[in-house]
Image (cartoon, coloured by chain):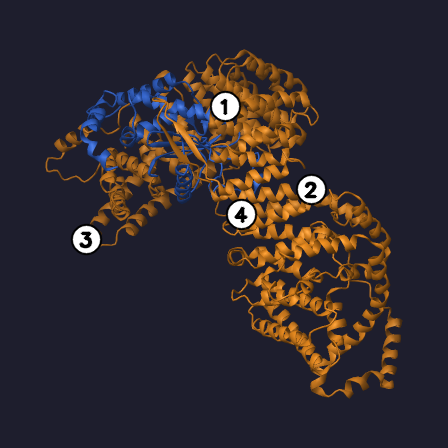
């Protein structure tokens, strides 16, 4: 292969220009220049900009050789990110050259730069129409070039125009032309699907061509077309199968398998027929790639049935062998397929746990990463711990690969395996998922899980994915809510987490659920005062979403702590209260309104508490014993699955039309109201209070009265239950012991301060009381459960399943909900496409109905042609005038210096000339272009 | 379908960028940088030829673990030859193993065009690189997988181009790139050292 511009050309040019006044460089000079100027980016940039401005001038030259040279350089420079669409018009000129060499350059440039400019495409259409007129064998090269070009820049009008010529080319004696025409037809069909419908048989006959390259191209095209619109190709299945068994070219076989995959996705009837044939092929072939694609076809074509264990095992055994191959590529893709088979039915892969363990330690991290996805399929209660340990080890261990150089066999070097952070993030996600999947179905040991969560919290605090914090926090919260017997040890994990500086600094998202859990289950904590001090004594300010949670959490802890001790230590309470007030006051000027609001509310409330505490000499004021708990302890939260609430909301129908009261009722109430006021019972009260007091306290007081009375009732109700429960349930004792043990690691920083007795923090009465008061109905049931769990060997802890909200309407919406969710998803993906590369091209083919003859076709084609012709003509005229102006504008924009102004005039004159010439050329057709 | 072919060296300098699906120029550059970043981190001695973590430009929204279920998956398959990376960006209609074979075919065809192909040959014969690729892939479709046929077509194209060329071009060398071979062998060694 020769270069387009070999060095001798320089000599020739030198002879032609004896005084050496020429500044154009060849592509070679350009590349040389780039290499010599590659020392610094600035230098390179300077050089490239200079080269570009030279190209600008050369491109404007009337000398077509020079122009071609410039276009070629511009095409090369595009690789360095320089847009060349400004030169489109010059490219078009070069394309229209009679010299093949120049035509090649022009088409190459056009294929890179024309796509986004519909106007130049329109001009190019005429030219390509001409170039594609196939005049016999001596035209092969020219037509070949044009066909390549057509594949990249076909428009629908060109497609309509050219398709007949292309179909003629399908019968050419040259295989080269046939295959290129087939590939070009693919793009034509995308723009103008009618062509395929009307010439289906003609096109399909190429599947049986004598030349393998032609068959290959035809199969490829059918395969691509069938991906977008499989329906019309289903009828070809027998023919395609014939090719599949008779042909020996692996490339074609692979394409056929891909094609069958597409067809079988839409045609279920095809599947049972196809399966035995593919299995046959798998037995007979020796090529790994064919074998792999056969399995791929079975899997992706939905041919593998959920309960077809035989076929699945045949495929998996083959893949198993591939997974042990020394070729990382084969290992990788087999691993991916393994996963896909597992997706069809997890049972298929469940026995391959040994293989997965092996792949988890593969030298190639990308294969490990795929194996991690397989874990979900093989995990069970027995190997869970083992799996998690394997994964956790990868965080610490630094693996090395021993590479043995093949030549000597003795020499070997060690290469450490770099474990990317994305992989570590994936590991953490996977660990959380396999541990918690199906409501902790594989989890047998929650103590161990707590330890794992602590480990991954520490590990995750060094990882960049901040969402991990939420996930881990969610797990901690889930255990707290769902596994009542584990609350104490989980609390100790949580306290460990919040006191670990690295986490609060790097992964504060983890703390959100931790603080919530501390608040919600603070009745398990005896030395709440120490916990409070820990929570508020951090110099580090938490991010706003954490502050939001920590305020109510602190209130809850405080309330529960005050009420837990039998003999409250008033001074200590006062001390803590002052600390809390100071802490909350720091939030009262927060710029986040919700934090500010919560802080201000809490401050006011605590001020009242402090006041009451000072006034009340005997014991705790009512505000602490009754009012505060009533804010939080009305009922225990139960787990509901994610989204349930939202679903309920969807079913809510709010009637805004019907008035609450009829006219008469309303009047009656108004009357009553008036009489009340007359009685004075209402206004008296507010009048009695002086103004200040009124504003500050009225709300709270009212609240106090009403709530406290309500609460008293509740309390009296709950007390007997508590006692009863305590006496009748042996679980209490056991639990108490257990918790005593836990105290050691719980809040160990307070050990020195607290006597052992005081740090025994349990008050199981509290543990259950709020639950009892509000769930007295389910009390009996609960007790039974508790007893069961004690009688059972503590192999399996009780895990509260998600509450089921039964509602017929809800069920209905649940069924319709998938739609809702998917529509949400799709909109989000659309958003995220912004700024991304979208490799999907819009085609008319995808939605084209091949079986319906289009009515618009009944319009006589000549009519359409004529119309289109006229439109084209008008359009062309417009363009010509525009391009004339544009080329002027460009030169002006390009240079600003005075010296060049003279030049510029010349140039623009030249430009006008060339563009005028160009116009003529386009109008007059072949001969004129030749003379350019 | 093949969406793009990127050839770049170990320093990330582009040697050929070909997009069969239209992509804006700045994004092409960005994609090249991202692909280079990812590819250069990998060890070709024992790692597979597939870019598992796609460059962020190609991610379709969620990069969650289940993006493998996405059948529209775009794959980036690359092979490393000496100092060059040959990278193909393809969709799921292409077989991974077949594309690896195709890259091999491509390189073999280049090898036959240049006797013993090196990065330097490809730097200075970018047009050759383009035309060989054009004979293998047309508009994203593979049209030829036979090395002999590819080289024959390239030769024929060159012969024809020279045959109909004007007087100036006729002065150029007619032996296929021989002059270049000689020139590069002698004259450019110090550039190679500079690289």
Which numbered circle lies on residue A435?
none
Which residue, given by chain and number where applicable, does mark 1 sit on? A325
User: Same chain for the residues at labels 2 and 4, yes or no?
Assistant: yes
Which residue, given by chain and number where applicable, does mark 4 sit on? A832
Instruction: Tell me whether circle 2 and circle 4 mark residues in contact (CB < 8 Å).
Output: no
- Residue A185 appears in the figure: no
User: Same chain for the residues at labels 4 and 1, yes or no?
Assistant: yes
Q: Is the residue marked by circle 2 packed among few (<14), some (14-19), or many (20+) residues within 10 Å?
A: some
Kindly report the distance in space between the C-alpha atoms of the residues bearing marks 2 and 3: 86 Å
Chain of the residue displaying label 1: A
Chain A, chosen colour in render: orange
Kindly report the distance in space between the C-alpha atoms of the residues bearing marks 1 and 2: 36 Å
Quadrant occupied by the C terminus of chain B: top left
Q: Residue at x 57, y 21 (%)?
A: A318
Which residue, given by chain and number where applicable, does mark 2 sit on? A444
Is disc 2 placed on a helix, strand or loop? loop
Q: Position of residue B7 (x, y in %)?
A: 37, 33
């Amino acid at each position: 292969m020769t270069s387009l511009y070999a060095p001798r050309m320089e000599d020739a040019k030198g002879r032609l220009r004896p005084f050496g006044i020429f500044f154009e460089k060849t592509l070679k000079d350009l590349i040389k220049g780039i290499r010599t100027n590659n020392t610094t980016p600035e230098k390179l940039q300077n050089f490239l900009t200079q080269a570009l401005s030279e190209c600008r001038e050369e491109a404007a030259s009337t000398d077509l050789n020079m122009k071609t040279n410039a276009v070629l350089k511009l095409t090369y420079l595009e690789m360095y990110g320089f847009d060349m669409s400004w030169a489109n018009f010059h490219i078009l000129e070069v394309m229209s050259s009679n010299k093949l060499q120049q035509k090649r350059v022009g088409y190459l440039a056009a294929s890179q730069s024309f796509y986004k400019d519909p106007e130049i495409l329109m001009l190019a259409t005429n030219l390509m129409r001409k170039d594609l007129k196939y005049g016999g064998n001596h035209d092969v090269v020219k037509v070949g070039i044009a066909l390549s070009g057509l594949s990249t820049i076909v428009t629908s009008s060109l497609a309509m125009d050219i398709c007949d010529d292309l179909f003629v080319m399908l019968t050419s004696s040259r295989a080269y032309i046939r295959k290129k025409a087939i590939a070009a037809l693919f793009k034509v069909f995308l723009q103008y699907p009618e062509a395929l419908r009307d010439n289906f048989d003609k096109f399909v006959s190429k599947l049986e061509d004598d030349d393998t390259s032609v068959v290959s191209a035809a199969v490829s095209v059918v395969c691509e077309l069938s991906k977008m619109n499989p329906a019309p190709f289903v009828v070809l299945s027998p023919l395609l199968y014939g090719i599949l068994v008779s042909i020996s070219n692996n490339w074609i076989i692979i394409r056929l398998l891909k094609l069958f995959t597409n067809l079988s996705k839409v045609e279920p009837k095809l599947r049972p027929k196809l399966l035995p044939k593919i299995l046959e092929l798998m037995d007979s072939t020796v090529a790994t790639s064919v074998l792999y694609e056969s399995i791929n076809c079975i899997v992706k074509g939905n041919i593998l049935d959920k309960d077809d264990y035989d076929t699945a095992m045949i495929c998996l055994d083959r893949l198993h062998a591939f997974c042990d191959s020394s070729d990382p590529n084969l290992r990788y893709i087999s691993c991916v397929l393994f996963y896909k088979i597992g997706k069809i039915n997890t049972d298929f892969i469940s026995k391959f746990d040994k293989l997965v363990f092996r792949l988890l330690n593969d030298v190639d991290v990308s294969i490990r990463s795929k194996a991690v996805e397989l874990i979900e399929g093989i995990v069970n209660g027995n190997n869970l711990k083992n799996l998690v340990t394997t994964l956790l080890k990868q965080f610490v261990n630094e693996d090395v690969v021993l590479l043995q150089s093949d030549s000597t066999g003795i020499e070997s070097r060690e290469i450490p395996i770099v474990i990317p952070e994305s992989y570590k993030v994936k590991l953490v996600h996977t660990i959380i998922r396999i541990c918690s999947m199906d409501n902790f179905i594989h989890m047998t040991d929650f103590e161990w899980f707590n330890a794992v969560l602590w480990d991954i919290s520490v590990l995750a605090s060094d990882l960049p994915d901040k969402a991990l914090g939420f996930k881990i926090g969610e797990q901690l919260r889930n255990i707290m809510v769902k596994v009542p017997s584990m609350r104490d040890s989980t609390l100790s994990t949580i306290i460990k987490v919040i006191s670990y500086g690295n986490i609060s600094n790097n992964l504060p998202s983890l703390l959100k659920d931790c603080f919530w859990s501390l608040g919600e289950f603070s009745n398990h904590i005896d030395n709440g005062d120490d916990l409070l001090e820990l929570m508020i004594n951090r110099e580090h300010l938490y991010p706003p979403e954490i502050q939001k949670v920590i305020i109510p959490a602190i209130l809850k802890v405080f309330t529960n702590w005050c009420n837990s001790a039998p003999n409250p230590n008033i001074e200590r309470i006062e001390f803590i209260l002052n600390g809390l007030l100071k802490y909350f006051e720091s939030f009262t000027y927060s710029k986040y309104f919700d934090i500010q609001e919560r802080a201000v509310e809490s401050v006011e409330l605590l001020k009242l508490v402090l006041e009451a505490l000072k006034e009340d000499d005997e014991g705790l004021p009512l505000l602490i014993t009754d009012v505060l708990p009533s804010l939080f302890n009305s009922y225990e939260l139960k787990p509901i699955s994610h989204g349930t609430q939202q679903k309920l909301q969807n079913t809510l129908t709010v009637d805004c039309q019907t008035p609450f009261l009829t006219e008469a009722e309303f009047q009656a109430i108004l009357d009553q109201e008036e009489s009340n006021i007359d009685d004075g019972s209402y206004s008296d009260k507010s009048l009695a209070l002086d103004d200040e007091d009124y504003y500050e306290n009225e709300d709270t007081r009212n609240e106090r009265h009403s709530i406290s009375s309500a609460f008293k009732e509740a309390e009296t109700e709950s007390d007997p239950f508590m006692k009863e429960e305590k006496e009748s349930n042996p679980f209490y004792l056991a639990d108490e012991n257990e918790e005593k043990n836990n105290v050691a690691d719980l809040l160990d920083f307070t050990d020195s301060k607290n006597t052992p007795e005081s740090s025994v923090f349990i008050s199981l009465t509290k543990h259950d009381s709020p639950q009892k008061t509000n769930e007295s109905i389910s009390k009996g049931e609960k007790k039974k459960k508790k007893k069961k769990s004690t009688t059972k060997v503590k192999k399996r802890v009780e895990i509260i399943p998600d509450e089921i909200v039964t509602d017929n309407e809800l069920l209905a919406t649940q069924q319709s909900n998938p739609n809702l969710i998917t529509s949400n998803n799709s909109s989000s993906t659309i958003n995220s496409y912004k700024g991304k590369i979208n490799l999907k091209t819009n085609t008319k083919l995808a939605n084209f109905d091949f079986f319906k003859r289009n009515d618009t076709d009944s319009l006589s084609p000549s009519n359409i042609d004529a119309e289109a012709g006229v439109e084209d003509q008008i359009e062309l005229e417009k363009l010509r005038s525009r391009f004339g102006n544009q080329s002027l504008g460009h030169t002006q924009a390009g240079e600003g210096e005075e010296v060049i102004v003279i030049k510029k005039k010349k140039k623009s004159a030249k430009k006008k000339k060339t563009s005028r010439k160009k116009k003529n050329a386009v109008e007059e057709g072949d001969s004129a272009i030749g003379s350019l | 379908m093949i969406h793009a072919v990127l050839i770049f060296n170990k320093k990330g300098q582009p040697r050929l960028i070909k997009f069969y699906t239209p992509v804006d120029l700045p994004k092409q550059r960005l994609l090249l940088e991202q692909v280079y970043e990812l590819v250069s981190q990998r060890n070709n001695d024992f790692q597979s030829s597939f870019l598992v973590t796609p460059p962020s430009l190609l991610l379709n929204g969620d990069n969650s673990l289940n993006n493998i279920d996405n059948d529209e998956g775009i794959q980036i398959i690359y092979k490393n030859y000496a100092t060059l990376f040959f990278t193909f960006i393809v969709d799921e209609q292409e077989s991974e193993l077949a594309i690896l074979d195709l890259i091999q075919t491509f390189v073999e065809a280049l090898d036959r065009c240049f006797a013993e192909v090196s990065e330097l040959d490809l730097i200075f014969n970018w047009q050759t690189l383009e035309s060989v690729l054009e004979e293998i892939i047309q508009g994203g479709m593979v049209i030829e997988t036979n090395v002999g046929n590819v080289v024959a077509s390239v030769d024929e194209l060159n012969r024809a181009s020279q045959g109909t060329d004007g007087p100036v071009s006729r002065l150029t060398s007619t032996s296929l790139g021989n002059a270049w071979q000689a020139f590069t062998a002698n004259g450019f060694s110090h550039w190679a050292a500079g690289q």
